[in-house]
Amino acid sequence: MIQAITKQQSGSALPLSRPQLPKAPTGIQGLDEITGGGLPKGRPTLVCGGAGCGKTLLAMEFLVRGAIEFDEPGVFMAFEETAKDLTKNVASLGFDLDGLIAEKKMVLDFVYIERSEIEETGEYDLEGLFIRLGQSIDSIGAKRVVLDTIESLFAGLPNPLILRAELRQLFRWLKDRGVTAIITGERGDNTLTRQGLEEYVSDCVIVLDHRVSDQTSSRRLRVVKYRGSTHGTNEYPFLIDEDGISVLPVTSLGLQHEVTTDRIPSGIARLDTMLGGKGFFRGSSVLVSGTAGTGKSSISAHFVDAACRRGERALYFAFEESPSQIMRNMRSIGIDFEQWVDQGLLRFQATRPAFAGLEMQLTMIHKATVNFNPQVVIVDPLNGFIIGDNMTEVKSMLTRLVDFLKTKKISSMFTQLISSGATQGTDDLAVSSMIDTWLVLRDIEVGGERNRGLYIIKSRGMAHSNQIRECLLTDRGVELCEVYIGAGGVLTGSARLAQEAQELASKLTRKQEIDRRQIELESKRRALDAQIAALRAEFEVREAEAMKIIAQEEAQATQLVQERVEMGLSRSADL
Amino acid sequence: MTTQFAKPAEAYVLRLYVAGQTPKCIKAFVNLKKICEEHLVEKYQIEVIDLLENPKLAGGDQILAIPTLVRRLPEPVRKIIGDLSDTERVLVGLDLKRKK
């Protein structure tokens, strides 16, 4: 990753590839990233540190992983522990040294030096050591060698001048042989190593540190020097656990996360509606803050449940409650975590934050995430990390955590307890700048009772509701419902119910009123119709009469004319 | 300074580890023979092991420095490194002389 940055910075579009120093990968989680590929191949590396820092372990892991993962057999030349002790000590890490030795992938050589048994009587050199080492290397074709710890020679052999000359010779000899070597040394007061080995081994120097601050211990690793290669120069925390060493590299050298536009549901239908209708962006970070007892964990439980239903894996980091307690509590709101745990989709990791230093916590989270590879991560709650006055460190740790999760496109949800005296919009940890979506659960105290309200302070990249919804924890899960804005302000809880009942009653009354009026109207219409019918009937009668009279008159008129004509005819008048 | 030379009670079995015919190794052998003839007389046995020819034998006696003289018998095993030019120290190392 570091090499990639270098290439980017070069800026040119030339396809020339720069020759990189050949490196021997260590296989140790995180160390290869820091060193840009591993230790320098064919050259000696110095690993120094105080007692109990993990030098022997680092060297041993380098060899074992080299033998198993990279097919490079190795020779471990031990000056301090016997072969049997070493084998026993690393067995707990799952390294089967006896097996590797039997397969000719490793040689474990214990060099015994006892000062009191040795008498110096003139000139000598360390050819014996060279022969032994050469013999071991040739017997299995080793490509890796560890000398742990070569400073024992200084304790054992009386003449430091001869020793120094021979050591110079040794490292030259190792380089000629082309083996990648790790030399371990004890930390000195003013020098890196007590005997000043860094003069001879100066291709790559790694310093291990184990310090205690505020009663918690933390382990750090630093690549002091790496000739011929860029490397991360900061101190990186690492931890030693049942799988060996894990180093936590700085994951974001630049804010280069890629994002998707996929949306995932929160598990609460009305919350999704408040979030522009579709839920959170995949790979975004969500902060749920609220005062005590407002339902933050319940909201994260829904999120997990929704993820598991989709068949995605979820990793739940619990810092306050044990997993069984969480599962029991969530059952009361109708969420069954056990089925997901049984199916392997949900994993809990519960520790007290005070158990280990911040860096260690981060490394453990990092490691668990890399191993389980979830799509959703919950951290519940964040507050446990604040011990004493370490706010800046907590913030730095959280920045790295959020960055790490985003780079892996893991959707994350953090819960945070805020003190009840705090005003809206503040957060103790000042993490809101890193968060994409911020939900706040708030107490609404009115009319002698406390109800919970939920609202969205921000949600980057989407339209979201600005309404406060009342948040109810029922046995069917978290339900959000409308908050009533009545004449007295925001109403929740029983006031809301009262208001709802009242509105229902008045609605009923109105309906009844409408019905009544309609009936009235109907009867008026009927009356009117009847009147009209009567008038019409009368009119028809009159009309019939009039028509009759008209007919009669016409008939008479015609008759008259007819009679005149007949009269005329009968009188034979001249017409 | 009075020195006491203890006469060896039993035979000495000595092993000299060398690496090829370097000047140091030759010198060590010569010195060894001289010391043995002087102080051990008949009761000694020298074995010369060349590690360039038999590298596997270096591990057995835990040899680091060349040349190394190992006194195998009488017990305990003692190791003397160097070309054996410091006779006094050799004798102390072989337990043939007590330091005052």
Image (tube, coloured by chain):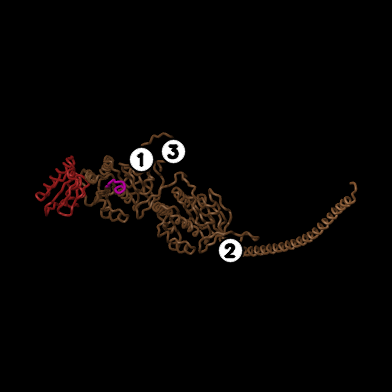
> For the residue carrying disc 3, how many other residues have a C-alpha within 10 Å: few (<14), some (14-19), or many (20+)?
few
For residue A441, side relative to residue A207 (left or right): right
In this rendering, which labeled residue sits more in front, label 1 or label 3?
3
What color is chain A drawn in? brown
Question: Mark 1 is on which residue type?
Answer: Arg
Query: SS at mark 2?
Result: helix
Tell us which disc is closer to us: 2 or 3.
2
Residue kind at label 3, given as amino acid type: Gln
The chain ID associated with circle 3 is: A
Q: Nearer the viewer, residue A514 or A466?
A: A514
Label drawn at residue A493? 2
The part of the chain drawn in magenta is A66-74
Residue type, numbered disc 2? Gly
- A248 on left or right of A135: right
Q: Secondary structure at mark 1?
A: loop
Horizontal and vertical percent position of residue A448: 60, 65
A12 over A268 or under it: above or below: above
Q: Earlier in the sequence, mark 2 or mark 3?
A: 3
Tell me the distance, in whole angstroms, between the alpha carbons under discs 1 and 3: 20 Å
Point out the tag, 1 or 3, that comes first from the N-terminus. 3
Q: Which mark is residue A227?
A: 1
- On screen, residue B28 versus residue A367, left or right, reads left
Colour used to depict chain B in the structure image: red
Q: Nearer the viewer, mark 1 or mark 2?
A: 2
Under circle 3, the secondary element is helix
In percent of width and height, residue A300 lies at 48, 57
Q: Measure the alpha-carbon separation of dots 2 and 3.
A: 59 Å
Residue occupied by mark 3: A9
